[in-house]
Image (spheres, grey):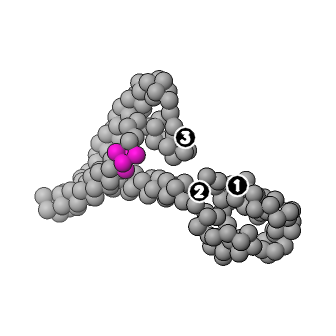
Amino acid sequence: MMHIHQQIKHHRERLGLTQDMLAERLYVSRQTISNWETGRSYPDLENLLRLSILFDTSLDELVKGDVDVMKQELDTVRSNRLAVVMTVLLGLTAISAGPSIMILGWWGAVIPIALAAGATYAGIRVEQWKARHQLQTYSEIVAFQKQQTLTDDEKRQNWIKDRLVFVAAMSLFLLGGIGLTLLGFWLVK
């Protein structure tokens, strides 16, 4: 199955067109055609329609190979956003705990609890994403995002490194949370 960049080049060459000639017909630059054919960028919907008409092929056939890649990229972007939301909410939880309790009394605990609940929800969604793609370690996540797969040997080699990275990250996050909470108490005084 060919991806869209391969499809464009294949059909352009099949019709005996140069990149310049195709660019003229689509009212784009030759560099744009080059970027499409090398996979550096994708044509927008209007140009996809023009390409399918020019190449006398269905739009479905033209983009079929890239649909799975696009789904994976979209899925990865969503998981990255959830990870950012989780991190920000955890940071806000740590920052708000001291001041909100100092100012509002024990009712102020509702604010950091709500923030922590949001962070927990985002964390659960990230874990669901990892389970759906059968990812367990940081190295596997990075390889997945780069559309690569790790061999069993690479997974074993990265196991210790991934555990050390996890412990270091959690330790720094915990220390940062404690520091931010103390800072929050100090600022309220």
- The residue lying toward the viewer, choosing from 22 and 141, is 22
- The residue lying toward the viewer, choosing from 151 and 146, is 151
Q: In terms of secondary structure, where does tag 3 sit?
A: loop
Q: Do the numbered discs 2 and 1 sit on residues whose CB atoms are within 8 Å? A: yes
Residue that badge 1 annotates: 6
Q: Is residue 144 visible?
A: yes
Q: Disc 1 marks which amino acid?
A: Gln
Question: Measured along the vertical axis of the image, is residue 74 above or below residue 143?
Answer: below
Name the mark nearer the viewer: 3 or 1.
1
Name the quadrant containing residue 188: bottom left
Residue that badge 2 annotates: 65
Name the mark nearer the viewer: 3 or 2.
2
> Along the horizontal axis of the image, is 54 left or right of 121?
right
Crowdedness near tag 3: few (<14), some (14–19) or many (≥20) residues, C-alpha within 10 Å: few
Question: Measured along the vertical axis of the image, is residue 47 above or below residue 93?
Answer: below
The segment highlighted magenta reads 129-133
Q: Position of residue 43 (x, y in %)?
A: 67, 67
> Along the horizontal axis of the image, is 94 left or right of 68?
left
Q: Position of residue 51 (x, y in %)?
A: 71, 70
